[in-house]
Amino acid sequence: MFCLVYASSATRLFSPSQLTDLLASCHANNSRLGITGLLLYKNGNFMQALEGEEQTVLNLYAKIYQDERHTGVLTLLQTTISARQFPNWSMGFRDLNSPEVRSLPGYNEFLNRPLTEAEFSSDPTYCQRLLTIFKKMM
């Protein structure tokens, strides 16, 4: 099993209905491909974990990387994993713009700042820990 985590900035802000449409598309595509994961969104920034067979994940990531809705795509983590962290989710989703999210334990302001590889390079598992926290809160 393979896991890839990336962050990116949207070329334009997504409305709630556009996020819903994006999520529906992710669910359909990821289910078909056998990919699971989690997508976080806040103020035009995304962080996403993709997990599945390595070549399938890499092929999907290549498409995501070329998607015109993203800019500044940063690969944060690529690793082999012993088991899926999101086994029952074709794509879990959390819109971090909702006010109640700020009061949740483990909430982190990382998507409020410009995203850089430097933020994650000193501790590559940081992004996995953040995703796991949000998974537990869903």
Image (spheres, rainbow, N blue to C red):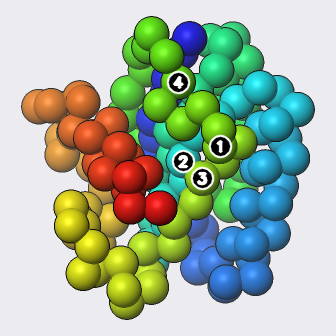
**Hey, which quadrant is residue 122 in on the image?**
top left
Give the amino acid at mark 2.
Answer: Leu
Q: Which residue is mark 3?
A: 92
Q: Residues within 10 Å of mark 3 (few under 14, many from 20)?
A: many
Q: Are marks 2 and 1 in contact (CB under 8 Å)?
A: yes
Cβ–Cβ under 8 Å for marks 3 and 1: yes
Label 3 element class: strand
Q: Earlier in the sequence, mark 2 or mark 1?
A: 2
Q: Of the residues shown, which amino acid type is indicated by label 4?
A: Arg
- The residue where tag 4 is placed is 84
Q: Amino acid at mark 1?
A: Trp
Q: Are marks 2 and 3 in contact (CB under 8 Å)?
A: yes
Amino acid type, residue under disc 3 in the picture: Gly
Rendering coords of residue 89 (x, y %): 65, 43
Marking on residue 89: 1
Element type at mark 2? strand
User: Mark 2 vs mark 3: which is more N-terminal?
Assistant: 2
Is residue 36 toward the left or the right of residue 102 in the image? right
Q: Gap in Å between the C-alphas at discs 3 and 1?
A: 5 Å
Q: Which is nearer the N-term, disc 3 or disc 4?
A: 4
Q: Which quadrant of the figure has residue 80?
A: top left
Picture residue at 65% right of the left edge, 38% below the top:
88
Q: Residue at x 70, y 30 (%)?
A: 35
Residue in the image at 58% along x and 60% along y:
93
Residue drawn where x is 37% and y is 47% of the image: 131
Q: Are marks 1 and 4 in contact (CB under 8 Å)?
A: no
**Mark pair 3, 4: CA separation:** 13 Å
The residue at which mark 2 appears reads as 38
Disc 1/disc 4 C-alpha distance (Å): 10 Å
